Image: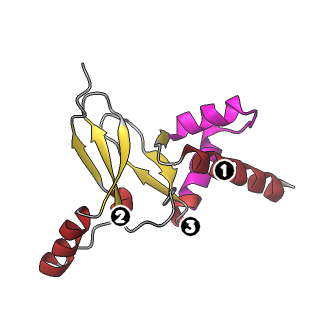
Amino acid sequence: MSSNYATKQRAAILSYIEKMGDDYQSASEILDGLSALGEKMGLTTIYRHLKNLEKEGLVISNQLEGVASKSYRASNPGGKSDNIKFYLQCEDCGKVVNFECHEIGHLYAHLQKDHSFSVNPEKTIFYGHCGCKH
């Protein structure tokens, strides 16, 4: 019974994260969101499943600027594209925006060819300012 219960929890967490799309949320925010949907589980359970989902390549985590704990989102939530995805985070308001652009591929190719460094676009975040009024 406990195995089936864990499977339902895992499925609920994964479903919730997939519905978030490109939005990053902390484990606490995921817990709050699931609670609002009537799903009851503890924060430790959330972390355990997030760790396993990340190992399986279904979830990506990042340490966002200004956020104390890791934040999570679905891996490749928009599907495949010719453009390379990366993320922009505003250092003023903290907003994280998914961005797609084939031009960044030139930088990634240069780093691979000339510096033998392979960039993970799923975890690439550029920090700057979005022009918000603060």
Which quarter of the rendering shows the C terminus?
top left
State which mark lies toward you, 2 or 1.
2
Amino acid type at circle 2 is Asn
The amino acid type, in three-letter code, at marker 3 is Glu
Query: What residue do we see at 12% from left, 79% from top?
Result: 114
Taking the magenta stretch, the answer to whether it contains residue 44 is: yes
Q: Which of the 4 quarters of the picture holds residue 29?
A: top right
Which of the two residues, 41 or 125, is positioned nearer the viewer here?
125
Pick the front one: 65 or 129: 129
The magenta-colored residue range is 26-52
Q: Which residue matches tag 3?
A: 56
**Gap between marks 2 and 1 measured at Cα:** 25 Å
Q: Are marks 2 and 3 in contact (CB under 8 Å)?
A: no
Q: Which residue is mark 1?
A: 15
Q: How is the image coloured?
A: secondary structure
Label 3: element kind? loop
Real-space CA distance between mark 1 and mark 3, rounded to the nearest whole angstrom: 15 Å
Closer to us: mark 1 or mark 3?
A: 1
Farthest right residue in view: 1
Q: Nearer the viewer, residue 16 or 64?
A: 16
At mark 2, the secondary structure is loop
**Callout 2–callout 1 Cβ contact below 8 Å:** no
Q: Amino acid at mark 1?
A: Ser
In the image, what residue occupies the spot 25% across and 68% down? 105
Mark 2, residue position: 83
* Mark 2 nearby-residue class (10 Å; few <14, some 14–19, many ≥20): few
Q: Quadrant of the N terminus?
A: bottom right
State which tag comes first along the sequence, 2 or 3. Answer: 3
